[in-house]
Every structure is written in structure tokens, then in C-alpha cells.
Image: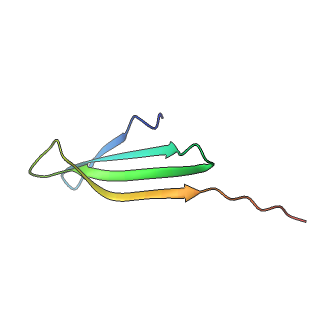
Amino acid sequence: MSQHDPIRFEEDGRTWLGWLGDDGQGGRWEVIGHLADDEPDLLVITRAQRFQQTFTEEG
């Protein structure tokens, strides 16, 4: 999946969209939201998060 192509699914009568991507600095991000009930061209973002990948060296 490309970070520009959303995951799309229907739940609770709403259309949900989600994106996953790489931030180019060793981390990843996700954005999840649904189309607004009264304005279907408007995306309501319910979660946006960045994950930093860290690795530890073992002895």
C-alpha cells in the first residue's frame, strides 16, 4: 500500500479512511478519520500519530 492510497472501509454507517506512511527519518505515521455525516467531502480526523522506531543493542 502506498502512503498516498488510503485504506477505506464502512463501519457504523460511516466511511472510514486510514493512511500509513514513513516519515523519512526512521519513524512511521498513521492518520485515521471518517467522512463527515453532513458534508461527505469533509474528513473528520479522529486519530493522528507518529511512531519513532528505536532499536537497542544487546550486550
- The x and y percentages for residue 47 are 36, 59
- The x and y percentages for residue 53 are 64, 56
Q: Which of 52 and 1 is in front in this view?
A: 52
Q: Nearer the viewer, residue 13 or 30?
A: 30
- The x and y percentages for residue 48 are 40, 57
Image side of residue 51 versus residue 6, left or right: right
Residue ranking furthest to the bottom: 59
Quadrant (top left, top right, bottom left, bottom right) of the C terminus: bottom right
Image side of residue 17 versus residue 57, left or right: left
- The x and y percentages for residue 36 are 17, 51
Q: In which quarter of the image is residue 4?
A: top left
Q: What colouring style does the render use?
A: rainbow
Going 61% across and 47% down the picture, which residue do you hit?
25
Residue ranking furthest to the front: 25
Q: In this view, does 3 lie above or below 49?
A: above
Going 39% across and 51% down the picture, which residue do you hit?
31
Residue ranking furthest to the left: 38
Q: In this view, does 16 lie above or below 56?
A: above
Q: How many badges with numbers are in the image?
A: 0
Going 58% across and 42% down the picture, which residue do you hit?
24
Going 30% across and 52% down the picture, which residue do you hit?
33
Image side of residue 6 versus residue 50, left or right: left
